[in-house]
Image (cartoon, grey):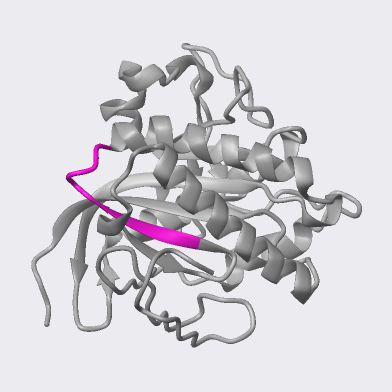
């Protein structure tokens, strides 16, 4: 049954260069991703049982209720993700290298009989899939993840420096979607003083909006295959479930099979 729109935070997480890996490694990466996510939620003290976690093949979409402050997501949760990725990097081989692109936005989402939808979901998906963001992670070769927030999150949370969040570590990353829509966003690389791969800016010369397209592929990097995920993934982002759960995602969301049924009961798991 359709319900009223509810204000939530939306987190989207993707694994870099996922589709360029062989199937066995993809399965291993998905297992590792859920282990990292589970531990990061625990370490950040977030109520996992209240968060909807939706699988999207090479990543997840999280619908986080308004009772969870976006400060906790942009601060402790992101730091915990980076720490957990560092732990995995110690034991993973180069073939299993796992790096994340993570986006955070907030806004109204609505639930119907099939799941969740709303412009907030669409925007968060566009943020994590943006070509300039992929370029930042590619340029940050020694880093484990890149984190992008919408302009709303930046102004409400990041610029105030809540919970040891460093506003100076963020740079503006405006870009235009393929439909010409301008999206203002801000990006950081945890552990770095400033994200690489972006044009230099000054107060008198603000950042110019990039056209949303994948960065040039580096030789042997798998970037071209990763960029293909962007064009094949639906921006609609329909979601389902309540609490930490998995449901059915329909549409052009995944590489390969387009309709994927996942157990709707139990804790976060691959």
**50 up-or-down from 153: above or below:** below
Q: Which quadrant does the N terminus fall into?
A: bottom left
Residue at the farthest top position: 203
**13 up-or-down from 200: above or below:** below
Which residue is nearer to you in this view: 181 or 33? 33
Residue at point 34%, 59% (across, down):
121
Residue at point 80%, 72% (across, down):
22
Q: Where is residue 128 in the image (x, y as percent from the top left)?
A: 51, 51
Q: Position of residue 24 (x, y in %)?
A: 77, 73
Quadrant housing residue 42: top left
Quadrant housing residue 139: top right
Residue at point 77%, 60% (across, down):
224
**250 up-or-down from 34: above or below:** below
Q: Which quadrant does the C terminus fall into?
A: bottom right
**Which contiguous range is marked in magenta?**
60-69
Residue at point 81%, 58% (across, down):
222
- Judge whether residue 196 is colored magenta: no
Taking the image as shown, residue 221 lies to the left or right of residue 115, namely right
- The number of discs equals 0
């Amino acid at each position: 049954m359709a319900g009223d729109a509810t204000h939530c935070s939306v987190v989207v997480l993707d694994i870099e260069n996922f589709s360029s890996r062989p199937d066995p490694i993809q399965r291993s990466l998905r297992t590792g991703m859920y282990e990292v996510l589970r531990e990061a939620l625990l370490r950040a003290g977030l109520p996992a049982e209240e968060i909807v976690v939706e699988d999207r093949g090479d990543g997840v979409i999280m619908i986080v209720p308004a009772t969870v402050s976006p400060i906790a997501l942009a601060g402790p949760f992101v730091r915990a993700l980076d720490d957990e990725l560092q732990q995995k990097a110690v034991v993973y081989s180069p073939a299993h290298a796992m790096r994340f692109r993570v986006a955070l936005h907030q806004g109204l989402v609505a639930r119907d009989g099939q799941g969740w939808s709303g412009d907030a979901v669409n925007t968060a998906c566009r943020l994590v899939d943006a070509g300039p963001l992929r370029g930042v992670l590619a340029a940050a070769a020694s880093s484990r993840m890149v984190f992008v927030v919408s302009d709303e999150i930046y102004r409400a949370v990041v610029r105030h420096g809540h919970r040891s969040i460093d506003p100076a570590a963020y740079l503006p990353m405006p870009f235009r979607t393929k439909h010409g829509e301008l999206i203002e966003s801000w990006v950081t690389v945890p552990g770095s003083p400033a994200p690489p791969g972006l044009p230099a800016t000054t107060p008198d010369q603000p950042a110019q909006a990039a056209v949303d397209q994948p960065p040039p592929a580096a030789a042997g990097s798998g970037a071209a295959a990763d960029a293909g995920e962007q064009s094949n993934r639906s921006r609609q982002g329909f979601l389902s479930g309540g609490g930490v759960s998995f449901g059915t995602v329909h549409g052009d969301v995944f590489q390969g099979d387009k309709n994927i049924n996942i157990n709707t009961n139990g804790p976060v798991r691959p």
